[in-house]
Each structure stands twice: as structure tokens, then as C-alpha cells.
Amino acid sequence: MSWDKGKETKSWKDIMEAEKYVYTLGEAGEKFLEGLKEGKIYGRKCRKCGRVYVPPRMYCEDCFEELDEYVTLRSPYIDSFTTIYYDDEGNKLDKPVSIAIIRFEGVKGGLLAYVEGEANQNKNVEIISYDIPLKVKVV
């Protein structure tokens, strides 16, 4: 394993043995993935303080209450983004790729997405694919 230090990029040259690790979804993760299959984004709401979390969690980070109410999230927008012009080998891409953190009004947390259209902070987006990562279109 080694780090290659290029001019402006760093790359990891080795095989990650991810197939040897087991990650269980748990109740909240399973419901979240079910929602993606249905074309919905589910968050989980705290009955005590009203906070909503995405991805859903089992406990509120602020008041430590167990979360048991699922809500469907709407009105996604771009919180932050980056545009990639070169691949990990330093070759210029035919078409730049924008990746963003998508958030929802009044919700704590966010999701990664590929962006179609000109990415700008606080721009509203429409989810066009519920794969992981999401694919969104600027509206």
C-alpha cells in the first residue's frame, strides 16, 4: 500500500477488501432503502424535540430519545458541491461531473448525489434516480 503524491491529487493504489466486512442495515437503514425502492426519501423524527434526521437514525443526537416516527422528505436542495474535471489518473474528463450534498429543509443530515445541470449552492433539485448515490437535476 502506498500514497502517490501528485501535483494536486492523491490516490490510493491498493485493493480494499470490503467484501470481507459485513454491515447490517438495522431497522432504520432497512426502512430507508425500502423508501429508495419506492422513490421516496425517509427521515426519522424525534417526538420530543421535533428534529428530523436523514439518513434515519435510531436515537436523537440532541435529546437522546428513541426515534420511532418516519417522515417522507420533500424539497431537496444543494447544500455544497464539487465539480470534477479530471479522473483519478489525471486525465481530463470528456464532461465534468458534479457531486453534491443534498439536504432537505429543516432536516439534519444529507445525502450524496450526482448533479445534472449547473450545480449551485442552495439550488432546488429534483431527484431523478433513487440509486446510491442519488441522481438529481437542478430545477
Image (tube, rainbow, N blue to C red):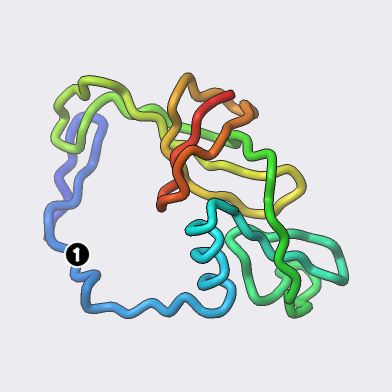
| Marker count (numbered) | 1
Residue 108, compared with residue 62, is above or below; it is above
Q: Quadrant of residue 70?
A: bottom right
What residue appears at the point 39 percent right and 27 percent down from the top-left corner? 83
Above or below: residue 130 compared with residue 25: above
Q: Position of residue 90 (x, y in %)?
A: 16, 29
Residue 21 sits in quarter: bottom left
Q: Is residue 68 above or below residue 99?
A: below
Residue at screen point 48% across, 58% down: 37
Query: In this image, 124 relative to 30: left or right?
Result: right
Secondary structure of residue under mark 1:
loop
- The residue located at (67%, 44%) in the rendering is 104
The residue at which mark 1 appears reads as 16
Q: Amino acid at mark 1?
A: Met
- Of 28 and 39, nearer the camera is 39
Q: Looking at the picture, how far across and down is residue 121, in whole percent?
A: 59, 27
